[in-house]
Amino acid sequence: MSRGVESILQDVNSYYSSKIKDFGATAQGVDWNGSVSQQLRFEQLLKIVPPENRQQGFSLNDIGCGYGALLSHIKQQDMSVDYYGFDLSVAMIEAALEQHGNVSGAQFEVADSCSRVADYSLASGIFNVCQDTAREDWEAYVRTVLESMNACSRKGFSFNCLTSYSDLEYMRDYLYYGDPCFYFDYCKRTFSGQVALLHDYGLYEFTLLVRKAV
């Protein structure tokens, strides 16, 4: 029996809410191994923003923002951003507000999708943990999220995913390993002719950058 988006979102919410409660506002609290790889992921995802825009200013939707680690990274890079973070988990947003509630130009919202259109949208790690959801149902969910990201992005969006090119002995049955070639083709045919696949930064994952002609 296939699973709908609402059922999948409930499981995602429960999983990540338990992580932040167990580990707090840390990389482990959003289910990453450590902060070094987390920062490396942010560097890849932010390549969607051209260098000239980083100082001139841009608006960004952070989908599945967790406790706002991406915002900290952006501020450390001295970028000028109008930031809006969205997350399913109330516990995540509470942690984000505790960390960044006084940051100018930053807002956070408990939501399962964007409530505004921004220049760019970004999602880090939200497609990795499928738990016991069947592959076809999870992939339908991923496509639904990508369609939503496209709709709320004026200039482009980026996301990452564990790769099907991972070593078999390290793969886990509760994680989703996407085919980078499939997602490259899907994004290029569905959203834009300007798509970049990044699979060369030393992690068992890939990042896709989808740029729109504006």
Image: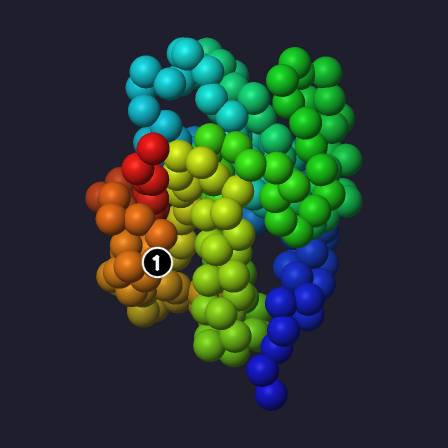
In the image, residue 134 above or below residue 185: below
Q: Which amino acid type is shown beneath numbered disc 1? A: Thr
In the image, residue 69 above or below residue 1: above
Residue 121 shows up from this direction? yes
How many marks are shown on the rendered structure? 1
Residue 205 shows up from this direction? no
Residue depicted at 41% across the width and 12% down the height: 56
Image quarter of residue 110: top right
Location of the C terminus (image quadrant): top left
Toward the viewer: 52 or 78?
A: 52
In the image, residue 13 above or below residue 47: below
Residue 180 coordinates in the image, percent (x, y): 29, 59
Residue 181 coordinates in the image, percent (x, y): 25, 61
Q: Is residue 119 left or right of residue 186?
A: right
What is the image's colouring? rainbow
Location of the N terminus (image quadrant): bottom right
Residue 75 coordinates in the image, percent (x, y): 51, 16
Image quarter of residue 49: top left
* Residue count near mark 1 (Cα–Cα under 10 Å), binned few <14, some 14–19, many ≥20: few
Residue depicted at 47% across the width and 22% down the height: 58
Toward the viewer: 141 or 153?
A: 153
Task: Determine whether the residue tagged by mark 1 lies in a helix, strand or loop.
Answer: helix
Toward the viewer: 204 or 142?
A: 142
Residue reaching furthest to the front: 214
| Residue at image mark 1 | 190
Residue depicted at 72% across the width and 53% down the height: 18
Toward the viewer: 16 or 63?
A: 63
Residue 32 coordinates in the image, percent (x, y): 51, 45
Residue reaching furthest to the bottom: 1
Residue depicted at 30% across the width and 37% down the height: 213
